[in-house]
Amino acid sequence: MADVEMTTESTVYVTYIASTREKIWAALTSSEFTRQFFFGRAVESDWKQGSSWKLTRPEGGTDVFGEVRIADPPNKLVLSWNVDGPPEFKNLPECIVTYELEPVGSDVVRLTMTEAHPTPIPKHLLEGGRRGWPMILSGLKSLVETGKPLPMPVPQPPKEKP
Amino acid sequence: MDKVFKALADKTRRRLLDRLHAQNGQTLGELCEQMKMTRQAVTKHLHLLEEANLIAVKWQGREKLHFLNPVPIVDIADRWINKYEQGRLRALSDLKKKLEGDADGGR
């Protein structure tokens, strides 16, 4: 651990979305939507408190898994977050990801995503999330507001020719 | 979007964002260190950054913590960049960074 900088810092990202909390909740919790803004990944869960949830890669295989800690639709979703990847990620202590949806006026919702690390982790491992999350949230905003996903380089399954 | 451009068009405010990028989740007191200006001036800059949604604020007990929120910057980039350009632009940006270093030279 000598030259690895450790941190317990949190990340807080906020985006304002011209939509309803119900639509944003649906976008966060259904795979047909997450495939369009979460780098092609599909979420899966019954979204009940205490249930398991997972995020599956476009080519198959679990990317992230955890437990639904709080499910209070359409206000708050708290998930434990374990990355199933290379050993340096796999051996990380789980972190907590919280989505909070608050109405701002009658037609705008403030979506806050918080990533909290209860135990110290190496700072360089946070870099991926720091780059990824803003793109994911911006993509979610675009999808919910316009019905179209952002032109993100999302891996697509091969299409069958008619 | 006007608010984002206005907030970014100031060296001090960009410096505050840089400091949060280096160490996220700082209090007003921590952010005032090394800033050669009054606490009131820093508060005013932070307020403009918060208005532009470039900073998210979270209360932790009695402490108000400031977090860098880059989502509006990504929104701006998305507006004028399409998926075919993205890879090439990233390569150019990486090359520029490598050649010039990461410093904000006010360009």
Image: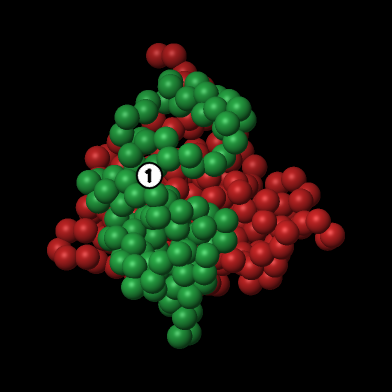
Residue in front for this viewpoint, A135 or B43: B43
Q: Residue furthest bottom?
A: B62
Residue B55 placement, left or right of A132: left
For label 1, the residue is B73
**What amino acid type should be assigned to the residue bearing mark 1?**
Ile
Query: Which image quadrant: the C terminus of chain A?
Result: top left
Extreme residue in the front direction: B36
The furthest residue to the left: A106
The 10 Å Cα crowd at callout 1, few under 14, some 14 to 19, many 20 or more, is some
Q: On the rendered structure, is A67 left or right of A144?
A: right
Which quadrant of the structure image shows residue A138?
top left
In the rendered image, the vertical position of residue B86 relative to residue A29, given as above or below = above
Chain B, hue in figure: green
Estimate the x, y position of residue A127 in percent, counting from the top left.
Answer: 61, 49
Chain A: colour as depicted: red
Q: In the image, residue B33 lies at what x, y percent?
A: 52, 69
- Confirm whether residue A109 shows in the render: yes
